[in-house]
Amino acid sequence: MPAKTHNPEYTSEHAHAGVHAELPVIETWDNQYHGYEITITIPEFTCICPKTGLPDFGTITIHYLPDKLCLELKSLKTYIVAFRNLGIFNENAVNRILDDVARASKPKWAVVKGDFSARGGIRTLVEARYPRNKMARVARG
């Protein structure tokens, strides 16, 4: 008997939950220097599992090489706190944060990592990179 690859209890609505939710704007400020990297660690990230309604806890790390703009931290905090009541899968949260950071600051490159606390004995680490690797999309089909 073949392995089950898709659980019909998880609907398309679960998978898309939070991906297009309206969130606060991440503001930026003009970068005065070049050739340096910025790492921002957010150790108290929370969001809600769209399937179970239970909270997920984790640490989000944003590492980027700024070009002309840098992320403004107070607005970033407001943006991150908005996830607290948002139903979104961990994987989607990390990718959403990467997309919004890239759209706001247009960095030369960026990496967003989500290190989520164990639930049911499973710990999840999600990493997304900008610019997106086109070959990874081709490999997935």
Image (cartoon, rainbow, N blue to C red):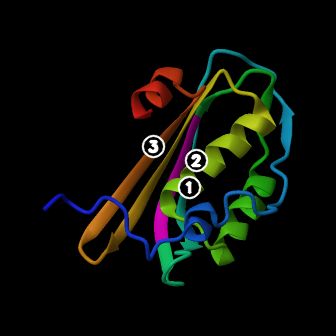
- Say above or below: 32 vs 130: above
State the residue position of label 3.
127
CB under 8 Å between callouts 1 and 2? yes
Q: Residue at x 17, y 58 (%)?
A: 2
Q: Which label's residue is closer to the chain start, 3 or 1?
A: 1
**Horizontal relation, residue 27 to residue 48: left or right:** right
User: In this rendering, does residue 41 appear at all?
Assistant: no
**Tag 3: residue type?**
Glu
Left or right of residue 28, residue 9 in this image: left
Q: What residue lies at 73% left-to-right and 69% top-to-bottom?
A: 82
**Could you tell me how far apart the alpha carbons at marks 3 and 2 are, in whole angstroms?**
8 Å
- Other residues around mark 2 within 10 Å, as few (<14) / some (14–19) / many (≥20): many
- Magenta stretch containing residue 61, yes or no? yes
Foreground of the two, 100 or 41:
100
Residue segment shown in magenta: 57-63
Expressed as whole percent of the image width and height from the top left, the position of residue 31 reads 80, 26
| Residue at point 53%, 70% (across, down) | 11
Helix, strand or loop for disc 2 = helix
- Magenta segment, prevailing SS (helix, strand or loop): strand
- The quarter of the displayed image where residue 16 is located: bottom right
Q: Nearer the viewer, residue 26 or 90?
A: 90
Q: Position of residue 83 (x, y in %)?
A: 66, 68
Tell me the kind of residue under disc 1: Asn
Position of the C terminus, as image quadrant, is: top left
Gap in angstroms between the C-alphas marked 1 and 2? 5 Å
Which residue is at 81% across, 55% downward? Answer: 75
Q: Badge 2 is on which residue? A: 95
Residue bearing the label numbered 1: 92
